[in-house]
Amino acid sequence: MTNITTLILIAGKSSRFKSNKSKIFHELAGLPVIDHIYNKAKKISKNNIIFVCNKNNINTLKKRFNNCKFALQKNQNGTADAVLSAKKFIKNKSNILILFGDVPLVALSTLKKMTNIFIKDKLPGLMIAFDSTDPSGYGRVITKGKKVESVVEELNASPNIKKISLCNAGVMLCKYELLFSFINKISNKNKQKEKYLPDIFAICHQNKKSFQYILCKEEEMLGINTLDDFNKVDEIYQNLLIRNLIEKGVIIINPKTVRVSYDTQVGKNSIIEPFVFIKNGVKIKNQVIVKSHSVLEYSIIRKGSSIGPFARLRPGSVIGENVKIGNFVEIKNSKIGNKSTISHLSYIGDSQLGKNVNIGAGTITCNFDGKNKNKTIIEDNVFIGTNTSLIAPVIIRKNSKTGAGSVIKKNIPSNSLVVGFDRLVKSMKRKKK
């Protein structure tokens, strides 16, 4: 976008958010709240982003977003004072977009629409507003045609103004000259003795430099002040993510019971059953079924496979095509080859399985020796009997079998049958005539 500097205001104390962790660092569908707004700001301003912080969050933000600038608002004297604290970082001829770090649902499409209108119509300033069925608590927007005359906060609103349904979203875009010509005229003569940035709308209108406005959905502008607010925003965002998957051809049974992450990818004609939790980093290809009560994280599931019910895929799991991972199976940091089956009650960790491998119920890979994680390799067409313990590091060569209850500590040659404690019964390899 053309020469736009984005200010992200996040200097509030979050005193109403009852948590040991700042609200902006709580994860919304697997991504911190502040990252949601930063990612959109970056699409508008690239690295030309300034965070207005407080003394408690500035160092954490600096570590997290090292390509940005950071202004410290030393005293909580209102949003106008917050903007003034960032002035020294802003170039004189910039256009300035102002966002709030605790309003994560604002759509990128809304911000792009805003910037396009602002630039195309050569406006001095543009703000976002929304119509609300219950506007209590919001600043009301007083307009004349397309122009904004003023914003009146709820505390100062008369009964007639409180009837107005058009509300201030807090997001604005304006020229540097306009903002810093009039921001010093904002007074702190109010009940909170703070300088409110929305007061600039009336000042600009009085000076014949009126802002105009565009509309957005109310849910885009929900701010997070309490844990209850966070839960409301989280529910809306989950519904949005689920709806996007359904529109792409994913079948989700009882969507309200399914939870996904901001980066979840699911292919067409896949089925997600109730009570599935898909955490970060999951890629599910076409025609996969994930059955009830399964939990997936940082895993890839290829075409035609079945997961669950009650399965757990931990980070680093890669499931091949037409694989069956059944109930009470846990996979960690392992590759499972095409057409392999692990039907129930098994743990496979730090392993590599070939094609057409069958893992019997109760099988575990003993991958940790107390100091190191070791690898188990199982080649193509191997049959692992029920309750087998594979003590890594170990390699089971192709076409071999283990008997039920075996403990395997030594490598097994191809075409072998092993039972008990590493006891080779016979080679199943055909002898040449």
Image (cartoon, rainbow, N blue to C red):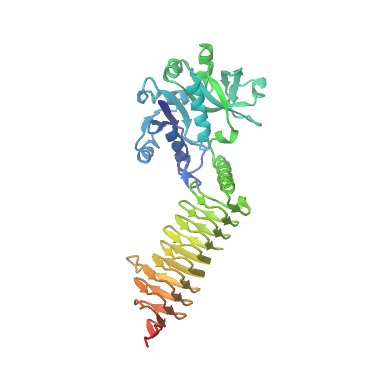
x then y, percent, for residue 305: 52, 62
Against 94, residue 39 (above or below) is below
x then y, percent, for residue 30: 48, 47
Q: Quadrant of the N terminus?
A: top left
Callout count? 0
Against 138, residue 315 (above or below) is below
Residue 93 visible in the displayed image: yes
Furthest-top residue in this view: 207
x then y, percent, for residue 68: 36, 34
- Classify residue 16 as left or right of residue 166: left
Residue 78 visible in the displayed image: no
Picture quadrant of residue 390: bottom left
Q: Residue at x 39, y 28 (%)?
A: 74
Q: Which residue occupies the foreground of this view, 127 or 400?
A: 400
Furthest-bottom residue in this view: 433
Q: Quadrant of the C terminus?
A: bottom left
x then y, percent, for residue 73: 40, 28
Q: Which residue occupies the foreground of this view, 181 or 355?
A: 355
Furthest-front residue in this view: 433
Q: Residue at x 61, y 51 (%)?
A: 255
Q: Residue at x 56, y 23 (%)?
A: 213
Q: Residue at x 38, y 23 (%)?
A: 87
Picture quadrant of residue 230: top right
